[in-house]
Structures are given as C-alpha cells and as structure tokens.
Image (cartoon, helix red, strand yellow):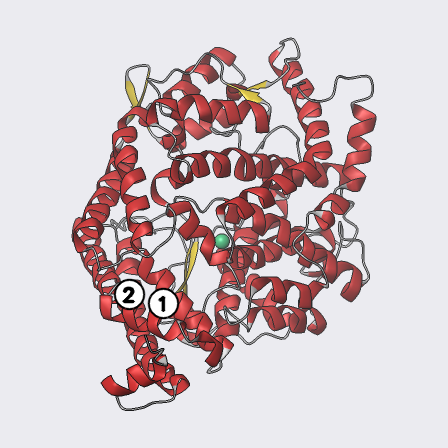
C-alpha cells in the first residue's frame, strides 16, 4: 500500500492549513470555552461554599457537568489526538496544551457517556454518605470536630480508645461505594488509554505508576533515620504520659490525629498566641499581603477585598459556610478570592500566608504568554509547595520579629520549634503520605486489590511504614481507609502532598543559603526583592514547561529530600542524644 502523508489526508478534508496554524485555531477555541466554563463553575462552587444550601449544591453540580461535557467532548478528544500525532511539528507550548486537553478529557470522556454518568452518580452518592455520616459515641451522636477535640485533650486511654474506635465507624458505610468507584474510576481512565486511575493521575507529572511509587519509596528511605529517631523519642514521651510500658510500635489511639498522619500535642512548642492579643483579623490578612508586596509583588486586586469571604460569620448570620480555608482563581484572570474564617491568632496568621501563596501563584502566571489551559502549577505539588513555603517563612522567629509580631528581644527555643515542625507537619507525614496512602491506593487501582483484602493491607502498611498499630485487631468487617476523606473524594492524589513537602524545603534552602545567606532554621524573608524575583521566575511559567526543568533551573537540583534532611540536622543530633541507650525503631 502507498504511504500517504497525514497532511495530504487532512488536506482532502479541510483547507490545507499548516499544522501549527490548525492547532492554534483549535486551541484558541478550547481555551476560550475552558475559561468561560471555569468561571461559571467557579462562581457556582463559590456560592455553594459560602452559602451552603441544597439549591446552591445542585447549581454547582450542573455547572460542573457542563464543564465536563465540553472537556470530554469526543470532537475535542479527536482533534487533540490527531494534532498530537504530528507533535514534532508543533511548538512545545502547543503540545503541552494538547496534552492538558486530553488529561482534562480523561476525567469524563464523553466517548462513553454512560460510564461517565455512572461515575458522577457514584461520586455524588459517596460524598453524600461521607458528609451525612453520623458518628456515635456512648450511644449519642458526636461530630468529627468533637472527636478531634477529645483526641487532642484526653489523657484517659480508655476514653481515647473508645473515641478512636468511634472515628472508624464510617468505614463500613463507605465501603460499598468505594468498591463501585474502584471499577468506575479505572473504567473512565481506560477510556482514553490509561492503564488505570492511578496511572491517569500520575500522568500529570509525566510519570508512570512505578516511577511515582519508587519516588515515594526514595523519600522514605532517605528520611528513615530521622523518622526512627522521632518515633523512638515520641513513643517514650507518650508511654510516660499514659503511664504505660514503652511499646514497639505506637498504638494508634495514643496519637492525637485519627490516622496518625501528624503528631501534634507531644511537644509544647513556643506558644505565640499572646503576641496576637489586640490585633484584628483584618491586620492578619493585610500582613500576609505585605509579605508579598514586600518581595516586590503587586497588591492584591481591589476585587479580592470585595468578593472574598475572609472572616467568621457574625452573630445573627444564618448562612452556613465551608470552614476549610481555600484560595480561588475564579475566572483564570484577575478574579482571585479567598475563603477563610480569620481570627487574630498564630494558626490563622500562617494559614493566611499559605492561602495568599496560592493567590500570588495565580497572579504570577496570569499573563498573555500563559494560555488559560496552562494557568496551573508546574505540577500539582508546586502550588501547594509555594503556599507551604510562605507558611514556613512566616513562622520563623526573625520574620515574626521583623513584621512586629514578636518583640525584638524574643528568644526562640530552637529545638522546640524544630521538633514541633517535624512532628506536626513534615516527617511522620511523609511516612503516612508516601507510605500508607500511596501504596494502598496503588494496590487498589493499579493492582486491583480485592476488597476482602483492603483492611488487612491497610494495617500492614500502617505497621510497616508508620510503625503504628491498631489498639485491637481490625478485621475485614471494617474499612478503615475509607474513613479518610481523600480516599473517597480525591483519589490517587496524596503523593502530591509528600512532593510538596519535599519541594518546600528545597526552595527554602535555596533562598536561605544563596539569597539571604542565613541559616535555613531562622531566616527573614521580609522585603527581599531578590526572593520575589526568584519566586516569580518559577511561578510565572505556570504549566508551560516540564516541572523537572523548572526545578532544576531554579535550584540547580532535581527533586530530593537532601534539603529537608539538612534542615533537621540540628534536631537529629538532639534526638540521638535523647535516645541514647534506647532501642531505635520497631524492629522488623
Ligand atoms: Zn494549600
């Protein structure tokens, strides 16, 4: 058979457009429609989050369906695929947009509308089971917040055990929906040629499932010596607190977090609350904006202050708002908003910095050179890393002194700061995120782990990676993984948080050592235009370049825990001293 050049075939169907021009025309249409639909969906979701009513929920779902119908449209998929067949002749930024079109489409490919509808219905049902679930404690309903309060405060092990067990009640109720979703999510992913849903999600990183799991294993291998020291120190502290013999593994109900993902409340860190007395909530948000304007970024758009929902409801206000802090880029242009409930305390001070970190990422890539489809982080973890970096920078004593929160003569207990940071945000978190969450979800989606084995596999990973064990055997009648929100509504994504944690220390170390020439454990970002230029160079690219290249250009380094290990070196030395003569870790 004669080989007919593809261009000739196309020429017979359409006027002979050079391939780049054909792609430009297609993407102009797709970008415009995508931006319009994001705005409509964003407005609807905003309303549903700031005024929770069934009508607003329904409107938001309709807007999401409209967006999905366009994103997954068969004609859009066909043209993107056809163009990508000639990607050698296309500009790299064109190829990236076309790949993004296909990744967006893969979440709801209308090439199989029945399957997509079944998935949406199952997701909606699962969310409603999750949100409406009523936990019971001593025969009475108990809220999730109350469960957390009790785990944060109770010193009575019998009470802790009962509350911890209550927190696992939702698992069996959520399991049937999750079993259904295992098949539906994989089915949807296969529609566009991905092996399974896990493979589809890691495709945003340009990685395979095996590569992602290996990356997460590398994180854990490199951080393991530090984790074992922390684990040993923590279990001795907790055994003392509860008057118990020191166990090999930490019983899950000894820790304050329901999944042992963070270990707060073990160390009394420097209490900063007093320094916020007499401040206003407005001052907190302005201070976070000042962090960025000091680095040379523009002020937040006027509309931010008008449309955001920043403070707790006033007495007498009857609407319900979502309590989770977030930042929104509603129209992918200048409409940046934040949803918070800011009060003048340290937690909201760091959170406001975190959320504006997202906002300034959005502001930085909103420019004509970055098409709407690529107004995203370099990878999903970059956005979170930038936000977390701001939060870390805003929590260090020299910055707090420069911004007037702490007095100039404040003496920080550096070990307590580091210990608290490690326990509550970073080190045990990696073993939960990279270890338990990533491995279990890879087993479920990529390896089709059968539901009868779900709970046993979950606890096998908790024992193996976290060195934590259940207070009593957890049989197959439970489904403890389903008690974690992300397992239900944000599947195969959690490794992103681990990557963000690792990235944060890489950026921070670069700034501390190369720009500020200050020790990474205590530095002051305030008013450094050079830091601003460094961050802007990363953020203004959005998703137009491969994230590995962006990282290498910015820091001269590939993704690595090296900076994180370095950062905690003083803590490591202190822990080794405290743990002298103790058995380190939990054995096999
Ligand atoms: Zn965030």
Describe the element under mark 2 as helix, strand or loop.
Answer: helix
298 w.r.t. 223: above or below: below
Marks 1 & 2, CB-CB < 8 Å contact: yes
Where's residue 378, x and y in %?
Answer: 53, 64
Q: Is residue 68 found left or right of 326 in the rendered image?
A: left
274 w.r.t. 91: above or below: above
Q: Residue at x 51, y 23 (%)?
A: 460
Which residue position holds label 2?
71
| Closer-to-camera residue (346/454) | 454
* Ligand 1 lies under 8 Å from the Cβ of mark 1: no
Q: Is residue 217 found left or right of 442 in the rendered image?
A: right
| Closer-to-camera residue (202/569) | 202
Q: Does residue 341 show up?
A: no
Q: Residue at x 80, y 53 (%)?
A: 519
Where's residue 161, x and y in %?
Answer: 46, 15
Where's residue 256, x and y in %?
Answer: 52, 27
Of label 1 and label 2, which has the lower sequence position? 2
Mark number, residue 101: 1
Q: Does residue 437 show up?
A: yes
| Closer-to-camera residue (484/328) | 484
The outermost residue toward the front is 1
Where's residue 71, x and y in %?
Answer: 28, 65
**Neighbours of disc 1 within 10 Å: few (<14), some (14-19), many (20+):** many
Mark pair 1, 2: CA separation: 7 Å
Q: Residue at x 39, y 51 (%)?
A: 312
The N terminus, quarter of image: bottom left
**Neighbours of disc 2 within 10 Å: few (<14), some (14-19), many (20+):** many
Mark number, residue 378: none
- The image quarter in which residue 162 lies: top left
Describe the element under mark 1 as helix, strand or loop.
Answer: helix
The C terminus, quarter of image: top right
- The image quarter in which residue 511 lies: bottom right
């Amino acid at each position: 058979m004669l080989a007919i050049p593809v261009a000739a075939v196309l020429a017979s169907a359409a006027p002979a457009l050079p391939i780049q021009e054909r792609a430009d025309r297609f993407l102009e249409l797709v970008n415009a429609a995508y931006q319009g639909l994001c705005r409509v969906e964003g407005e609807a979701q905003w309303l549903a989050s700031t005024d929770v009513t069934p009508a607003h929920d329904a409107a938001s779902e309709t807007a999401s369906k409209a967006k999905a119908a366009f994103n997954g449209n068969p004609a859009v998929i066909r043209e993107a695929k056809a163009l990508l067949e000639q990607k050698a002749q296309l500009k790299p930024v064109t190829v990236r947009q076309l790949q993004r079109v296909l990744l967006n489409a893969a979440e709801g490919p209308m090439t199989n509308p029945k399957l997509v509808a079944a998935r949406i219905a199952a997701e909606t049902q699962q969310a409603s089971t999750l949100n409406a679930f009523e936990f019971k404690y001593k025969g009475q309903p108990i809220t999730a917040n109350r469960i957390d309060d009790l785990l944060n405060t109770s010193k009575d092990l019998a009470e802790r055990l009962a509350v911890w067990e209550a927190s696992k009640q939702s698992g069996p109720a959520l399991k049937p929906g999750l079993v259904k979703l295992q098949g539906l999510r994989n089915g949807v992913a296969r529609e566009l040629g991905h092996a399974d849903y896990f493979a589809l999600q890691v495709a945003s990183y340009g990685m395979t499932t095996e590569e992602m799991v290996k990356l997460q294993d590398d994180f854990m291998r490199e951080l393991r010596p530090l984790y074992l020291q922390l684990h040993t120190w923590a279990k001795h502290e907790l055994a003392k607190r509860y008057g118990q013999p020191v166990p090999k593994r930490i019983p899950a109900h000894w820790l304050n977090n329901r999944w042992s993902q963070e270990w707060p409340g073990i160390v009394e860190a420097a209490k900063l609350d007093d320094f916020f007395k007499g401040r206003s909530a407005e001052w907190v948000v302005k201070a976070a904006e000042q962090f960025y304007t000091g680095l040379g970024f523009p002020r937040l758009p006027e509309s931010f202050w008008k449309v955001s929902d920043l403070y707790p409801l006033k007495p007498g206000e009857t609407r319900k708002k979502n309590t989770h802090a977030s930042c929104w880029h509603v129209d992918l242009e200048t409409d940046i908003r934040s949803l918070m409930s800011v009060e003048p305390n340290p937690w909201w001070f760091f959170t406001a910095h975190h959320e504006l970190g997202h906002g300034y990422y959005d502001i930085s890539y909103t420019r004509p050179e970055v098409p709407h489809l690529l107004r995203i982080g370099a990878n999903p973890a970059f956005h979170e890393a930038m936000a977390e970096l701001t939060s870390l920078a805003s929590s260090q004593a020299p910055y707090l002194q420069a911004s007037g929160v702490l007095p100039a003569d404040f003496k920080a207990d550096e070990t307590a700061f580091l210990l608290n940071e490690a326990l509550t945000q970073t080190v045990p978190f990696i073993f939960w995120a990279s270890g338990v969450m990533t491995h279990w979800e890879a087993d479920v989606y990529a390896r089709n782990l059968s539901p009868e084995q779900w709970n046993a596999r979950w606890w096998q990973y908790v024992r193996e990676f976290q060195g934590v064990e259940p207070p009593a055997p957890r049989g197959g009648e439970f489904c403890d993984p389903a008690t974690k929100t992300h397992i239900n509504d944000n599947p195969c994504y959690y490794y992103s948080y681990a990557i963000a944690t690792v990235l944060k220390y890489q950026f921070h170390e670069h700034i501390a050592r190369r720009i500020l020439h200050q020790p990474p454990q205590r530095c002051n970002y305030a008013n450094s235009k050079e830091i601003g230029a460094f961050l802007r160079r990363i953020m203004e690219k959005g998703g137009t370049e491969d994230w590995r290249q962006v990282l290498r250009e910015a820091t001269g380094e590939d993704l690595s825990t090296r900076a994180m290990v370095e950062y905690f070196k003083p803590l490591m030395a202190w822990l080794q001293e405290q743990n002298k003569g103790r058995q380190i870790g939990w054995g096999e």
